[in-house]
Image: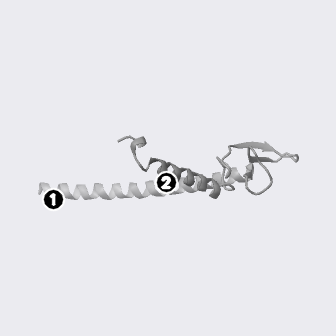
Amino acid sequence: MTDMADPYYAERKQHKREADWLHACVYANYCIPTKCTCGEAITADTDERGRNYYVCKVYEDDRLHTRHDCLAAIEEELKELKSQYDYEVSLRRKLQYEIVQMRKDIEELKKLCYF
């Protein structure tokens, strides 16, 4: 059955749009924003002092649009990447330890099978 024939297709699409919007709201001022809470695209802009910001295309200073400092956003993004890297390294170490243990178990099983 295709998605269009599904009677709940429109409802699922609406839930997906709402989830995407909530994601944009939650992360609007964290890391590098990809979408404003109003649904518009984000662009890079410079203010009169020379500071760079990630700004909504239709930005108005009414707290409904995203305007996030580029330097802070990049620092947050880097912190997230470091955290992910640390997790991946710990997971790899754990898997390597398990492989060593499995090799020992295999060797013991081979000895039991041959004797």
Q: Is residue 18 left or right of residue 76?
A: left
Q: Is residue 45 left or right of residue 24?
A: right
Can you identify the residue that label 1 sits on? 112
* Picture mark count: 2
Q: Position of residue 53 (x, y in %)?
A: 76, 48
Determine the secondary structure under disc 2: helix
Q: Position of residue 7 (x, y in %)?
A: 41, 48
The residue sitting at 22% across, 59% down in the picture is 108
Q: Is residue 107 above or below residue 41?
A: below
- Which quadrant of the figure contains the N terminus? top left
Can you identify the residue that label 2 sits on? 88
Label 1 is placed on what type of residue?
A: Leu
In the image, 32 versus 18, the foreground residue is: 18
Badge 2, how many Cα within 10 Å: few under 14, some, many 20+?
A: few
Query: Which colour scheme appears in the figure?
Result: one colour
In the image, 36 versus 81, the foreground residue is: 36
Q: Position of residue 9 (x, y in %)?
A: 45, 47
